[in-house]
Amino acid sequence: MKRSEGRILTTHTGSLPRPAELVRLYVERAQGKPVDEAALARAGEAAMRRVVAKQREVGIDIPNNGEQQREAFFLYVRRRMSGFGGQWQRWPRGDVLRYPLFQKAQQAWMANTVAVSNMSPPKAIGEIRYLDRAMVEAECDDFRAALDAAGGGFVEPFLTAPSPGIIAAAVLNEHYPTEDAYLAALGDALKIEYDAIVQHGFLLQLDCPDLALERHLSYQNRPLNEFLDFVERVVATINRALVAIPRERVRLHVCWGNYEGPHDQDVPLAEILPILKQAKVGGFVLPFANPRHAHEYHCLAGALEPDQIIVAGVIDTLTNFVEHPEVVAERLEAVARVVGDPTRVQGGTDCGFDTSAGMGRVAEDVVWAKLAALSDGARIASQRLF
């Protein structure tokens, strides 16, 4: 994993806006309607090539494929693994329940939104197995071809894969006798994807919103210690799945849910950070731009191992404000002061811009302006820090 030697490197958290036609195809398939799979594959690849080129244009150093060939950051696994079927409705978010007027407004927005919902996932009804490594291999090959077509200029690319914990929490277990057995099966299956991504020369980003989000979702009415036990078990499962991967090739993303809401029931970063540090990874991707967690970069003081980096979220992925580059620079400088070494700091976003197809709240042209502001702010911070 590259360090910010001489200047602050820029990256983001994964998903980027998908074209309307691609979203439509994903939504129709999720609804069980017949879809031309070849047309969908062509649309996904074309969208992926476009976002790779756009990342180069706005100055992103560490890009990815924008998750264009997936309908959502974790739901895509139902097409790569066995054992999933049916559907259920996830628990409502604990913070949203406290504000009925906001909840009503959010429901009205959702009713008029064409999107793939992460809140109506499938269930685990059979044995979880990775069906065919060729599926992730093809995604890696497509991404490599797009990078080559873009003409270089990137520092290093990454691909994302979900935590076994977010699948265990979101996909209701109706097959395995215990949650630990379910987690173990998910870890074994996901290991194939993790290994393939790294073997293709990419950084692996583990998307683990479960390690924070599930406190006010699945565990909202349960004691904190039960949630922390869940976090520990998920991190242990991740470590087993990463056994063949050098830790410096993995970064771990944690957030409290990529949705606009009160978030006043979020677990503090200080409560979960000691457990997150047990993960055998080379760095963390954490949100410090949104108003609920902007102060928590202070938790990084003395928290990272000497060989670990932090991708600091300094761009909000839920508002159409374009951050001023000076604001971006100040945020990056503040994180660098706490960490004590600017070479271990990268600039990033709080989360993805379209974690589930069509769910993004930021207009596509604004997204690219935000990422350009990230690059501009990183240049300003670099002039001051180096």
Image: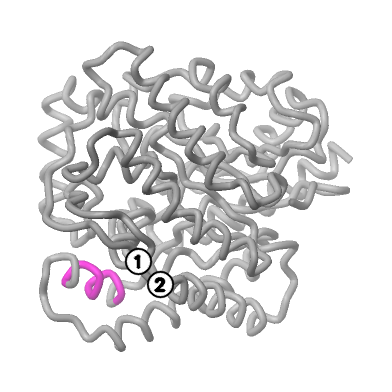
Circle 1: is it few (<14), some (14-19), or many (20+) Cα within 10 Å?
Answer: some
Query: Looking at numbered disc 1 in the image, what kind of residue is underneath it?
Result: Arg
| Label of residue 4 in the image | none
**Cα separation between marks 1 and 2:** 7 Å
**Residue sitting at x 61%, y 77%:** 144
Query: Looking at numbered disc 2 in the image, what kind of residue is underneath it?
Result: Asp
- Considering only vertical position in the picture, is 273 above or below 160? above
Apparent side of residue 265 relative to residue 276 in the rendered image (left or right): left
Apparent side of residue 99 relative to residue 340 in the rendered image (left or right): left
Magenta-colored stretch includes residue 26: yes
In the picture, residue 346 is in which quadrant? top right
**Residue sitting at x 61%, y 60%:** 158
Mark yes or no: residue 357 visible: no
Q: Position of residue 89 (x, y in %)?
A: 13, 43
Q: Position of residue 49 (x, y in %)?
A: 52, 79
Mark 1, mark 2: which one is toward the viewer?
2
Magenta-colored stretch includes residue 205: no
Viewport quadrant of the C terminus: top right
**Of 62 and 220, the residue lying toward us:** 220
Residue beneath disc 1? 80
| Label of residue 132 in the image | 2
Q: Are marks 1 and 2 in contact (CB under 8 Å)?
A: yes
Task: Write down the region rendered in magenta.
Answer: 22-28
Apparent side of residue 298 relative to residue 323 in the rendered image (left or right): right
- Considering only vertical position in the picture, is 225 above or below 58? above
**Residue sitting at x 65%, y 33%:** 331
Q: Position of residue 233 (x, y in %)?
A: 44, 29
In the picture, residue 267 is in which quadrant? top left
Instruction: Give the prevailing secondary structure in the magenta stretch.
Output: helix
